[in-house]
Amino acid sequence: MKTLFSLRLLILFALGLPSSRGSISAAEHPGAWVEVRSPHFTVASNAGEKEARRIAAQFEAIRAAFRNAFPELRVDAGKPMSVLALADADSMKEFLPDFWAAKDGVRPAGLFLGSFDKNYAVLRLDANGTGENPFHSLYHEYTHAILRVNFRKLPLWLNEGLADYYGNAILEENGIELGRVSRAELGVLQHTPLIPVATLMKVDQGSPLYNENSPASLFYAESWGLVHFLLTDPEAAKNKLLAKYFKLFEETDDAEEAGHQAFGDLKNLEERLQRYARQPNFRGDLLKSKASLSDKNLAARKLSRAEGLTLRADFLQHSGHSREARPLLKEALELEPKLAAAHACAGYDDYLTLDLDGSEKEFSEATKLDPSDFRAFFYLAEIAYLRKGYTAQNTLQVIAHLEKTAQLNPDFAPAYGFLSLAYLQRSDTRFKALDAALKANWLEPTGLAYVADTGNAYMMLGRKEEAHAVSTRLDKAAITPQERYTAREFARRLARHEEFAAKKQAQALESGGVAIMEEETPPDSPHLQPASGPEFLAGAQLAAAVEIKTAEGEVEEAECEDSRSVRMKFAAPEGTLLLAAPDAAKITYWGKRQDSMSAADGCSQWKGRKASVIYKVVPAEGKPGEILSIEFFR
Ligand SMILES: [Zn+2]
């Protein structure tokens, strides 16, 4: 599900005929970039200012539609949303080289790419005007991104149903059309016996009914149909059935029970849904929502050539193509040595290769040139932590960078998660840790690592019962290997902490009431969200003496010793390396494609694959190096 920096690279296919929209101005000024800023989006386009304005207005419209439908939801993801409105296939190719690597590979018309510090929407303007919506997948994923910042958990049917409902949104010149029927899904619904609604509501990621690779499945169709019914059937809409369900699910944490309470007899609901889908002239209700924003008011500016290069380099870095980004950055900095964004990208590149000196230099330069870049301050905090850990003085530095990050972007959850741990390290800041962890949690309720952060705070503040409640909650909620690891680690830490507290108390009794043991060290690593951000480096707890190396090469042999540990021979230019990891689930998998994450499930598939590995050198003779992260190239 989540791969490199939690990239969600969802492809969609250009189905229809390209229209000429957008290509005229691009042809007039080949390669020229223009940037339009609307209140919530930044649109960069090489198809001219008019197109950039139109797309900005459309994105504001889809955001406004969410806002209207769910006034109580947050509709921004806490990180910048950068929209790339590309003129045609040729410019798409420059951003997404992977899709053009194979001669007859699928060529996306648009995609949503969510990453640790930034989200991207990429669309091809000449792919408009097709029968079924060419941007379905883009809106579908955008919907997930919004739901993710609002709900700790949603039943899968509701999550996918809403994403498909909004995935079918059609953006028009100056508004948005919702409720468009997907012919493919309607076809499935009309010609297949339905999944019993009670069963549908209980489907989770492990269920055979749910298959991410088969969006045309009955599960998706029925989930979409049910959401469509609940939102657009006049009676269902009048009774606010969907809102009721949301609320009841929050209360009961039981998808089926909430269904019973909100909808009554589920068998009955199924029959209504069946009838609804088989209406001869099924149209649903088309909701028209006009964009309140006039695109003429949006600020626009031409980007310099260096800025255009940086734009592409930044995207390439975020999509696993750091190497391809390097020459672009070099050229950009030669053209404009004072370009803040290019320095930030260069700093990020150094950071990924663990060149901390280079990275610090570039990010410092970036903050000098553009003091409003929250990302640069966040990485400066990471670098400070990686260098010296939580020494008394260094912790203050880490905190200062993070507080600056939070000041610049008050909705950036990772800053608060990291802050909560940094605050815990010092007795004079400890009291602030819980608030920071709760804030991270509120901003990104699906991130279990932030739940663990609240647990750490409760633990260190001596709030035992709440710490145990967190442990129980983590245990219950953990699904992915990373989440299970987070839950296990927290439980272990809590047990150690309590053991320590008991000893301390016993000693205090023995010595007449004076505790003489030293204070236990607070939790140490930022542990933001394992495998969803570069913070794995911090998670690796670098001590000064530890040597971290990067190697590129091919997996010669891989042995999965039991279900968890892994050993491999890795052929690199410097020779064959022996590498191992005690728990494959703890390795951070980077990759451009969804398949990279599945590597976590079985190292039996690794053999013969080209990869880049970051590993910790183990000084003892003959001992394998410890794998910290792997990026598979194919
Ligand atoms: Zn989905």
Image: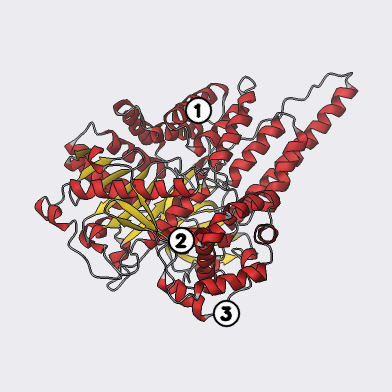
Image check: 354 left or right of 585?
A: left
Count residues near mark 1 (Cα–Cα under 10 Å), then give few for <14, some for 14-19, many for 20+.
Answer: many
Q: Amino acid at mark 2?
A: Tyr
- Could you tell me which quadrant the C terminus lies in? bottom left
Residue plotted at (51% across, 38% down): 413
Residue at numbered disc 1: 398
User: Which of pointers 3 and 1 indicates the residue nearer the eye?
Assistant: 3
In the picture shown, does residue 270 fall above or below 309? below
Q: Secondary structure at mark 1?
A: helix
Residue plotted at (57% across, 46% down): 447
Q: Amino acid at mark 1?
A: Val
Residue at numbered disc 2: 165
Image check: 4 left or right of 358?
A: right
Q: Which colour scheme appears in the figure?
A: secondary structure
Residue at numbered disc 3: 193
Q: Amino acid at mark 3?
A: Pro
Instruction: Point out the tag, 2 or 3, that comes first from the N-terminus.
Output: 2
Cα separation, mark 1 vs mark 2, equals: 43 Å
Residue 149, visible in the rendered structure? yes
Residue 581, visible in the rendered structure? no
